Image: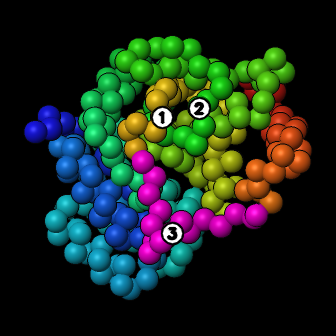
Amino acid sequence: MHQSYRFDDVTLLVTHYNRSNSLQRLLDSFENEGVTFGEIIVSDDCSAPQHFRALEELQGKYKFRLITARSNKGLGNNINKGQEAVKLPYTLYVQEDFVAKPGAGKHLKDALTYLQEDGELDMVRFYAYFKYPFLQPFKSGFSRMIFSPYPWYFGYRKFYYYSDHPHLRRSTFFSKFGKYAEGLKSDVTEYKMMLSVIQKKGKALFYDNFQDIFEQVNSSSEPSTVKRSSLRQSNSMLIMPVKHVFRYVKFHFNYNFRSY
């Protein structure tokens, strides 16, 4: 039997669009792991009628607060209106296509403890597509993320300090880093927040075994709604070096060194 973990000071914020089965899978996974929250908020970006009806049915079971939209306004607006509805001091932000894995409760408890103990920490990251390149061991499998604009911290991946992947943050996040850019593609919205977090000297922890807490699940019936160009996704031996150099130069060009 799983140990129960209740997080009274944490709001689970889930952004949702046309993937009600995925949302149910996420909420079920927390229930199966014995993880409960002070509040759950689902921010919906004007889903189709069949998904909205499913949301209302799920609401009966999980008692979440449903934040709706009259039209589809994109990821930035969806996160903004969801985060603005949060009243508890900490927010666990998770998009609907993730599930909590066995043991998630303990790692969430550790992360919350670290945020409560260190007032300078802004967030704790739980998932990524790759390991952040510059880490300083902390404890219990977490490391401090180290960002430096200087060239001996080489590689464009150092700029991926912030990510929309699952993370626990202070609910005052907007007061320090600003709101998410709206009316843009989701990748651009994430990119702008990434730069804001770095320029405003955000402090974060990163879980070293970053795919042990959450798993991203995109089923054929509810695939990802984010579309990327084939060139951007290409792992060709000829294209990859060019992509690496281009991104490194681009990020440095957009980054304001005087702010750090």
Chain-order first, disc 1 or disc 3: 1
Chain-order first, disc 2 or disc 1: 2
Q: Which residues are magenta?
A: 215-230
Examine the rendered structure and indicate whether residue 27 appears above or below residue 100: below
Helix, strand or loop for disc 2: loop
As rendered, which of 167 and 104 lies closer to the eye?
Answer: 104
Instruction: List x then y, in percent, for residue 132.
Output: 61, 30
In space, the residues marked 1 and 3 are separated at their CA atoms by 22 Å
Residue 217 is one of the magenta-drawn residues: yes
- Residue 2 in view (yes/no): yes
In space, the residues marked 2 and 1 are separated at their CA atoms by 7 Å
| Residue with the mark numbered 1 | 210
Q: Which residue is at 63% across, 50% downward?
A: 190
Residue lying at the far bottom of the rendered structure: 49
| Residue with the mark numbered 2 | 131
Instruction: List x then y, in percent, for residue 210.
Output: 48, 34
| Residue with the mark numbered 3 | 223
As rendered, which of 96 and 11 lies closer to the eye?
Answer: 96
Residue 32 is one of the magenta-drawn residues: no
Viewport quadrant of the C terminus: top right
Examine the rendered structure and indicate whether residue 83 appears above or below residue 207: below
Residue lying at the far front of the rendered structure: 237
Residue type pointed to by label 2: Lys
Helix, strand or loop for disc 1: loop
- Where on the picture, by quarter, is residue 104? top left
Q: Which residue is at 35% across, 63% downward?
A: 23
Helix, strand or loop for disc 3: loop
Q: Is residue 42 left or right of residue 240?
A: left
